Every structure is written in structure tokens, then in C-alpha cells.
Amino acid sequence: MSEIRITVNGRRFRVRVPPMKRLLDVLREDCGLTGAKEGCGEGECGACTVLLDGEAVNSCLVPALQANGRKITTIEGLARGKRLSRLQAAFLSAGATQCGICTPGMLLMAEALARGRTGGRAIDWREGLAGNLCRCTGYTKILEAVKEV
Amino acid sequence: MTLIGQRIPKLDAADKATGRSRYIQDLRLPGLLEARVLRSTVPHGRIVSVDVSRAREAPGVFAVLASQDIPPKRYGYAKDTTALKGDRVRRIGDEIAAVAAVDADAAAEALDLIRFEIEPLPAVFDPERTLDPGAPLVHEDRGSNLVRTHDYAHGRVEEGFARAAHVVEGTFRLPAQAHGCLGPAGAVAEWDARGRLTLHDPTQIPFLIQRDLADTLGIPPSDLRIIQPTIAGGFGARLDLYPHEIISALLARAAGRPVRLAMDREEDFATDPVRPRTVVRMRTAAAADGALLAREADVIVDCGAYVSWGAVTPIVMMHTMGSFYRVPHVKYRARTVYTNTAPTGAFRGFGNPEITFAIESQMDELAARIGIDPVEMRLRNANQPGEVTPQGSRITSCGMKECLEAVRERMPPPGTRPPGGRPLLRAAGENLVASATQTETESPSSPAICPAGRIEGTEPARSPLRRGIGVAAVFHVGGGARIYRSDGCGAMVKIDDFGKATVVVGATDIGQGMETVAAQMAAEELGVPLEAVRIAPADTDVRPWDVGVHASRTTFIAGNAVRAAAKDAKRQIEAARTALGLPPDTPYDKVVRSEHFRDQGSLVIGRAYFDPPNAMVDAENKGNVSAAYVFGAHAAEVEVDVETGQVRVLRVVAAHDVGRAINPMYVEGQIEGGVMQGIGYALLEEVILREGGMSNPNFLDYRMPGPQDMPSIETVIVETNDPSGPFGAKGIGEPPLVPVAAAIANAVANATGVRLRELPMTPERVWRALRAWADVEAPGEICGKE
């Protein structure tokens, strides 16, 4: 067991977990944040995407130890109170959620891409979201939503 | 009307976008145990012994079950299996024993302590070989691997072929397609002290599970309550009772604690009730003017080791055979067969994508033979409003013609140059689809055969890229489908003291937006804002009967039920207003309060049950199974790299007759999602079997389309206002997947002159087909670089 200190959505957590416990499980089991989803556990679907110091990662592939002392943003941390983030609001108005299991990971990946945009450079959204699978929407409405932002 | 036809975000969209929706993996209960299942690693064998004694002693273990510990109750469509297998395993992945422990790690460790011995037996995997004399029997007691035969005929098919000017013939091979629901399967079971079971289960059929699971457990169905969490994808994967549901209940009973049995990705793939491997041998005949004369098919469908919904897909294929286009002579035979592979199930379209691939490929082949435009060929044979097909399908509204014309308007007409591409055809005046083929059934001297990428009178193209356009149409049920005795759904609308309406409806929201559509319809009927309507939770103790979410039935059936219940509530409000002498503009809250606070008062609860006016098929497999039918047409533009065999879909136009779009945003969502799954079926997705087990059970090797694989999709909603649909609406869940593979195969044929009859059209298959064609027809032409 190791003591891990992480800041999740601006709140500090201290947890005692096996050092190789997956960040995904730390978030879901030790922090009570079930918004990150496990679609495959192998980094192939993107459903567990969270931001680690602002960078999108598959939390199923990150050991707890590696997150020690770092800042994490999960889907629960995107809205400010009842006010949705621009991307979240765009997902609603574009109809980009169906079953919704991919939505948290998709939103966080899009958030990372939008934050990482430099200058006036256009984002290649199809390429940028290529690691996030969705089995319902055909991606059309998701791409519509992210392009609004 | 104010709410019908509006682009309203789904009621649960904000919960989903903020991580609040709870899926089966998110459920937390005090004392919840986690379960794991020991599975067979051989495809067929005799179970010699199973020893669970050491596992029972392992730390953290609460229950271990093998077949001798459970009721020997057979279940399933053919009652051909038990939840844990006793004497035989019949496929890789068969359930042998199960453990419930404090956490998943402890359960997995205990699983390793189970000793078992299986004596391997010969196995059969190929549905085309399983009926051969001497093939190993999957179920010895049945004496044959044939599950059943479906026969259908109308007209005199031989007469139709005898009169034909053109006949095309071919064998089409369709792969097993996995659902790939992004949330793996799972269930949570908890028993109360009186012996009542609550099962949290993302099933598509809560009311059928209630009956079937109770029977398996030996309890009355009323002692079983199903609560559906948010469902992480279904598409048919959750349409039956599965071993994990039974095992979770048995473990929870044995452990005396709630138990979750949740699968990981590999297990979800390995036990997925896939779209069955299907082989269609088909021939189609047409007159010289393009009128269809006869269609005949011989079909084999793989059931896997046990019978589930995969075995029922021939019924849907039969309806497409008998009613899609006006064909005077039809003959159809399908055989469903056992193999030592995972049981096959329902997948969006339910047999229709399989048979439509064959039918629509042959429509293009015939159009090329005759020398007419493929859209014209389809229009000439299109179904019509008011038609009763020889099979007995009573077509009410029908937008087939409008859909075909819509895609024709939006794709380049025959012979024009697509942007950045080269001419589709080698000579002016040729038709849109020039079809050549490597099979012997089509005469190589046919004038229609020409490699479209080659342009007569010019140098052979230097670029390896060839562009082509293909179209395909779809016929499907859209007003229910009576394959059970009931095709109904109940609904209640309660108006509360505050003037708000609660809709209690049996139907299941699987992500498609049922609850939002139900709320829109109720609000519209009651004349209240959408915010005044809420949907009661998905709980069989609360909701009335519904047969399940399948067959593109929910908007039509549940919509009619909700609308009628809302009307009933409104009638009660109006009656109370009159009886109480209140002015006609008295708000609902005041009417309801005045009504129930008075002496001998009453409450306002509207209710309705809608069971559509359709019928089960008769002994000849004829009958009107649906109260409405839906139509659509797709056009796909592709680019084929003739050096690598890679096919890229550049653009899809998808037109669908939906009767009336209650919420166009989610109608488009159904169309776009269906196109995506259809592209996967056409080009990427295939369950690859090794010794009967899935050898690619992960998202790297089982490739589902990602955003980078998707073309732009232009959706066209055709509204025909069905007379019996709620506000004119018909179903749209399945149809958008159905014609995609055929449209793409037709586009590949248009681009290269080569017809693919096997899916998925992987680069290797396309390359081999191009090579085979080139070797025979034009050595050095297509793959000239070698």
C-alpha cells in the first residue's frame, strides 16, 4: 500500500492504495467518482479518459503512483455548479449523447484538444477523437458539437 | 402542435454529459459481492469432474456454484441449456462454475482453485459443414445439427425463372458481427428476507426476463423485480435471458448478499450473442423491361451451440423475401443449424441486413444486365402505398419512391465526374453501375461488364484510386412485429397536485430517446410544457407490461400507448372540471386538487394499453406481422485503392420514410448510428473464430468504426404520416443499418467492376477479388505494377 495524494476537480484526496492500482479504479472506488467508465481496460476505447495535469489520458492505463501529486479533471469537474461547460452544452444541443457511456471520455478528450489549440489553428477533430469509440451515434452529432466550440 | 417535430435534447442528456447516469458497473450496495465465472476452454467436451472444495475455503469467498449446486432447469428458446453446464460443454466460453467473493480479485483467485477435467470431443464450427453426414453432433440427443427449417413460397417460382430475360445468381457470405456495446454486460442480484429477488439488469426485455428467469429459479414471476439501470448500448445484445443473469441470482441466493456479475471486455466479446454467420444462395429473375419476376433463396443460419434469437432471423429474412419490391414468384428456404460456437442472437436489423445484401446486390447486377439505371430499376419495382403484398404485408404509408428519388437528387447522376475523381464509366451513355464479376454465374461476355476505372480510348489510369457510387434500398417493419403473442405496451399518465404529469410506460429507453419521445407526446396531448412531464423509473414493480425494445417498435407502439393514456387523463380532467363547475381555463393543479379533496373524491390517472392490429404468421408463413412498414434508400460514394484493396467511404446519403419525425435530432441520430454500424459490417467487423472461440476479442482486433472511418452522412427524413402511427410516426431503429453494406458493395462494383459477395470487404478480400478478375479478364490491367 502506498499513500497517494491527488487533486481531483480541485479537491485534494489522500488515499492508501496498492501503487499499481489503476487511476480509473482509484477515481471510481476511492474517490467515489464513477463518471469515468471502463469500456475495455486496455486503452482501446477511450471511455475512461480523464485529464492528468491538463493532458488527456486513458485512466485504465495509469497506475496510481504515476498520478501522485498531480491534478486530475474528471467529467464531474467540467461543469461549474449547474452551469455546463461550453462543450457539455454543445453536446446537449447537438443531440450528441445516446446511450451516454462514451460521453464522459469523449467530452474530456474534446476538452483537452480545445485547450491545447494554439493560435488560430484548426483542430482535426476526427483524428483527435480517433481513440474514443462510440457505438451509437455514428460520430456525426459529436463532431457537430465539438465544432461549435 | 408545438412539441412534435422539435429538436429537443434528451431528458437524460445533462446527466449523461456530467457523469451522473448510473450504469450497472456504477451501482454501489452495502455488502455487494463481485462474481467471476469459470469457462470452458475447449469447444466440445465431456465434463468428467468439477471440484470446487478448495475454492470454497479461499479467503473472501461467499459462494461457489457448479452445476450440481443449482436447479437442473433447462431454459432458452429450445430449452437446450442450463446456466452452469453439467455433463457437456459445447463451446469455448461455456459456464462451468461461478464464484462470489468480497471483490473481483478474490473471486478470480478462487476461480483458479477450482479443479476440473474435461474430455475433449470432436467439434464442428462451419455452418456449411455441420449438416454433413458424420459431422460431430452438438446435441447428441437431438440426433442432428439441424435446428429447424423455414419454408415460404408464393407464386410459382420455376415459371418466373422460365419467363425471365435475365437471371443472376450468387452465394453471399455474411460474417458474425459483435454488438460491441461500449459498456460490457452485467447484472446485480439481491434477495430480500421473504425470498423476493431484485435484479438490476440493463436488459431490453424486463417483462420477459421476469417470466423466464423466475421459471429458471423456481420462483413465481411476481417474486422477481427488474430494475433497469442506464443501458450502455443494446442493439439486440440484451434481448434474451443469458447465463450471467441466472448465475448472479443463484450466487446471491447462495451467498445471502447482493452479487454483481460484470464481464470484462474479452468476456463480453466471447459471450456476445452475435449476428449469426449466414450464407445466402440467391437467384433473381427479371423481364427485359426490368420488372422482377422471381426470387429464390436458400439460406443457412448459424445458431451456435444453443438456440437464441439468431435462430429466429430467418423469419425476418422471409418477410423481406416475400414483400420487398413487387415480385410475383418467390421461394425461400432457410435452415438454422447448431455449431460448437457462441450462441448467436439478435442484432439491429435481425436478418434483414443479411438478406438485403443479397437482394440489393442482385438488383444492381440485373440493372447492369438490362442496361438501366439502378435507381430506375428499383423505382420500377418499388412497393406502393396501399399495396398488400402476396405475403400479406398490408402497406399503409410508403415513401420508398420518395427515398429513392431523394438519394438520386443528392448524388452525382450517372456518368458525371465526382469531385476530384475520374469519370465513373468508360464511355458516355453507359449506366451508373457497370458490374463485372469473378463468378462463373455471370457471363463474361455480358456487354455490361467493364472495369469502370479504365477509360476507353485513354491510357490506363496511373492513380490506383477508383471512385464509384452505389445505391441500395430497405424494407422493414415499423409498426411493431408480432413474433410473441403480445406486441403490446401499457402506459399510465398521472396528473399530480401540482399540475405535473408522470408518464409510466412499459417501454425501455436504450439510449435512442424513448423517454424523451414519450414525454413530448404526453406534453403535446395534455397541452403542457415539456418541463411539466416526467418519466417514472424503469422498474417492473411500477411500469406496466411491454414486450421489449426490439423490432423498431417503440416509437410506434409505446407512442400510441402514451398518447392514449394522456388523452384519457385529459378526458378525466375535463370531466372533473365540468362536474365541479370550474371554468374551462382552470389549471390542471387546481382541477386535480379540487377533485380529490372533495368528499368521495378521486385522482386523475389516465391509462391505456396498445396492442397493434397485426398478426402472427399462419402455417404458410403468411400474415401482416406489422401495423406499418418503413422504407429507405442509401447512396454511398467510395474510393477503392486497387493496389491495396482498401475501400474508403467518402459520402453517404441516407433517406428514410419515418412516417413523422417526433424528434428529428434523434431520428438523425438513429440513421447516423445505423450507417456507422453498417459501414463496420461492410468493411471492418468480423468475429474471427479459432477452434470455435473468438480470436479477436478486443477493440484493436475487432475493428469498429472510429470517427476517422466515418464519411459525411447526409440524412433525408421523408414524412409520410402513417394513419395508425402516433402523430403519424413509424419506427426507425433498425432500418438505417440494413442497406449500407449493399450500397457499399454496389459502389465498389461501380468503381472497379468487381463484385464482392462476402463481408466484410477487407483490403485482402477486395485485393484478391481484383486479382482474380484481373487474371481472367485483363492481365496486367488493374494490378499492373507487379
Image (tube, helix red, strand yellow):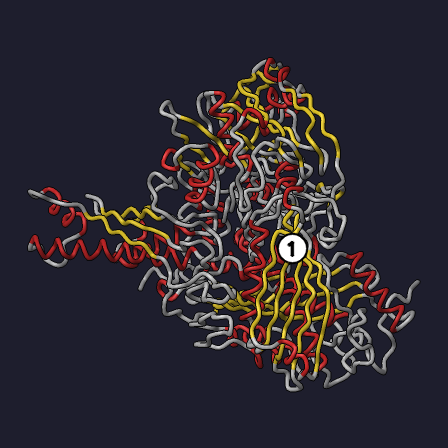
Q: Quadrant of the N terminus of chain B?
A: bottom left
Which secondary structure, mark 1? strand
Choose top left, top right, bottom left or bottom right for residue B429: bottom right
Choose top left, top right, bottom left or bottom right for residue A57: top right
Q: Is B375 placed left or right of B427 in the picture?
A: left
Q: Position of residue B257 (x, y in %)?
A: 46, 22
Tell me the residue that label 1 is attached to: B301
Q: Is B621 placed left or right of B342 in the picture?
A: left
From the viewer's perspective, is residue B748 above or below residue B265? below
Q: Is B609 placed left or right of B772 in the picture?
A: left
Choose top left, top right, bottom left or bottom right for residue B457: bottom right
Residue placed most toward the observer, B497 or B392: B392
How many residues crowd mark 1 within 10 Å: few (<14), some (14–19), many (20+)? many
Residue B169 visible? yes
Residue placed most toward the observer, B597 or B243: B243
Residue at 78 percent across and 57 percent down: it is B763
Residue at 48 percent across and 25 percent down: it is B252
